Image (cartoon, helix red, strand yellow):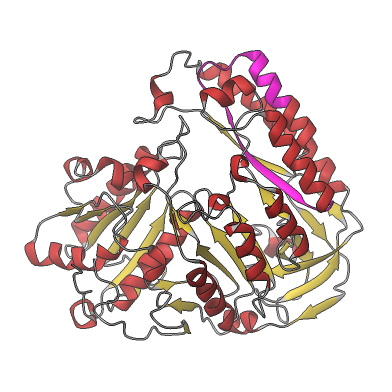
Amino acid sequence: MSTPIVTPAQAAGRTYAVRTFGCQMNVHDSERLSGLLESSGYRPAEPGTDPDVVVLNTCAVRENADNKLYGNLGHLASVKRQKKDMQIAVGGCLAQKDRGTIVEKAPWVDVVFGTHNLGSLPVLLERARHNAQAQVEIKESLETFPSALPARRDSAYSGWVSISVGCNNTCTFCIVPSLRGKETDRPPADVLAEVRALVAEGVLEVTLLGQNVNSYGAEFGDRSAFANLLRACGDVEGLERIRFTSPHPRDFTDDVIDAMASTPNVCHQLHMPLQSGSDVVLKAMRRSYRSERYLGILERVRAAMPDAAITTDIIVGFPGETEADFQATLDVVAAARFSAAFTFQYSQRPGTPAATMPGQLPKQVVQERYERLIALQEDISWAENKKLVGRDVELLVATGEGRKDAGTGRMTGRARDGRLVHFAGDPATIRPGDIVHTTITYAAPHHLVADAPIQAHRRTRAGDNVEAGRRPRTSGVGLGMPSVGPPAPVPASVCGA
């Protein structure tokens, strides 16, 4: 039975801020949390002010997740002593894992909610205020698919669209399945409805999001579902770029490669986690592929799309990893020629099988191997980027991705292959969300520079919205189309918990 959303009258005038830790799934969940709060009458806090409600959307996967949470809570405790009516809510994966422990360690927290009941937040905040008592509510299964909830989108030109939540894999280093649950897939019609709704508001780029995005269709028994979804997105008029993250090598089919290569608006970018190049370590990780299969996928991707930029995730120092195992990882990295790699030093995650495995490696061994991997990948990234000097690129102009742009007189955009490009442009006429064409003049390991004259500049509806300070607010698929600007009232039955 659903609980009505807090009415705007109850939350009138109160401000909020959502702080996000972790992966893209958490970022997208935070858009939903912001949408829920605004639909309940809260408004975003002005920069530099203390909000009436602070929501910490946590991660249990990244290193030092606990320390980051309790460090933030410690700071907020001092703020709350000065602002008595402030409320603090903790949600996300760490909340799902630690539950009531959070309130025991930080009794100034007002609300704890899990990954399965995002829609409960407004009601829990009101209940905590009314009862003057902390509210902890953790559901064991998905209560409402997040995309049925309202969202305040972070970007006017690029949007996340979840196609599934949860994961059916059992990787020994990962706690996600126990926190997000088994995979639940959205019907393709719902996904396409959300994509079309975003495009109708000027969004140019959509990233399809799932814990294991290319296993989409497992729940309704269709192995071709993900490839077919890519092709269907290709038919959405006005959608210029489609990306997806993150696929699993086990489920990566030639049909997906064909869909990527034959659908013009699917970007030739692939982020596919490797984790280790050692077959022994992959088996210990319960990764259901081996290095030969992984490299075979890359070979077929590049045969179909020679310009594809491929990135990956790698864990260094998994329990039992020998020097020979690590060398196997270096060998695969050298063969794969990744444009970039997100590298992590293994650290124990309570609740995962790997945390109690024998052969936990000393920190100094892991650090030394990590540095060798970074050095190799930096050389490869730089060499691969140098090949692009002199090449013409199409850029979707971005907001705030270049920390030195102001000092260099450059702006920043993303190429179709996902690479970050700092380019010579006039911010008086070129807006984030616009499209520009230019030529690469310099390469560094982590970015490209285009100081050549702009060849073409196309103003877009997304750029118009950025210039006007507007962002799409979606009311949930099947529950109304999105609107740009102040959110429309949401019926009580829509966002209940």
* Residue 461 colored in magenta in the image: no
Is any atom of residue 335 visible in this view? yes
Task: State the residue in front, 207 or 426.
Answer: 207
Residue in the picture at 56% in, 61% down: 208
- Is 232 positioned to the left or the right of 111 in the image? right
**Magenta stretch in the rendered image:** 305-330
Residue, x 46% and y 81% (percent of image)? 482
Q: Quadrant of the N terminus?
A: bottom left
Say if 121 sits above or below 292 in the image: below
Residue 457 percent across, percent down from the top left: 79, 79
Q: Residue furthest front?
A: 221
- Whether the magenta-drawn stretch holds residue 322 is answered as yes
**Residue positioned most to the right:** 390
Q: Is residue 48 visible?
A: no
At horizontal 20% and vertical 54% (from top left) the residue drawn is 137
> In this rendering, would 50 be left or right of 371?
left
Quadrant location of residue 105?
top left
Q: What is the x, y in percent for residue 382?
A: 80, 42
Q: Estimate the x, y position of residue 222 in percent, counting from the top left.
A: 54, 55
Count of residue discs: 0
Against 214, is 494 above or below? Answer: below
Q: Is residue 152 above or below residue 23?
A: below
